[in-house]
Image (cartoon, rainbow, N blue to C red):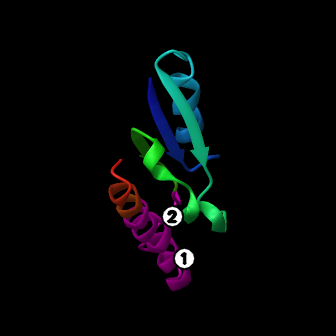
Amino acid sequence: MKKVLITGKNSYIGTSVEKWLLKEPDKYQVATLDLMSPDWKSHNFSTYDTIFHVAGIAHVDTVESSENQKQLYYKINWDLAVETANIAKNAAV
């Protein structure tokens, strides 16, 4: 059985993939993690076979957005993705 952690707990893609994986409960055990919670960094990633990272901000036009919106977009969609990947890598996922 493969253990899958989906980041972006309430995202459209995350919930859709979770529903799809749970159609085969003998093959997949699925957990979700909300990266908006400050406790996410203490979550034990080492127990999973796969991290499916879909936490992010969608539908932001970085060309026409305010500087604050652009910074938030890159903080979430770039910095958070890199941080999540590094934590997963360090946990040998």
Q: Callout 2: helix, strand or loop?
A: loop
> Quadrant of the image for the N terminus?
top left
State the residue at coordinates (53%, 75%): 72
Q: Gap in Å between the C-alphas at discs 2 and 1?
A: 8 Å
Instruction: For the residues labelled 2 and 1, say whether their Cβ atoms are less than 8 Å apart.
Output: yes
State the residue at coordinates (51%, 15%): 26
Q: Main secondary structure of the magenta part?
A: helix
| Residue 51 in the image: above or below residue 39 | above
In the image, is 58 to the left or to the right of 49? right
In the image, is 10 to the left or to the right of 54? right
Q: Callout 1: helix, strand or loop?
A: helix
Residue 46 lies, in percent from the top left, at: 44, 49
State the residue at coordinates (55%, 83%): 68
The stretch of residues the image draws in magenta is 56-84
Q: Which mark is residue 69?
A: 1
Evaluate whether residue 89 shows in this view.
yes
Q: Nearer the viewer, residue 19 or 25?
A: 25
Residue 89 lies, in percent from the top left, at: 33, 56
Asked whether residue 71 is drawn in magenta, I would say: yes
- Which residue position is annotated with label 2? 60
| Residue 69 in the image: above or below residue 55 | below
State the residue at coordinates (36%, 47%): 93
Mark 1 neighbour density, 10 Å: few (under 14) some (14–19) many (20 or more): some
Q: Nearer the viewer, residue 31 or 90?
A: 90
In the image, is 81 to the left or to the right of 17? left
Evaluate whether residue 36 shows in this view.
no
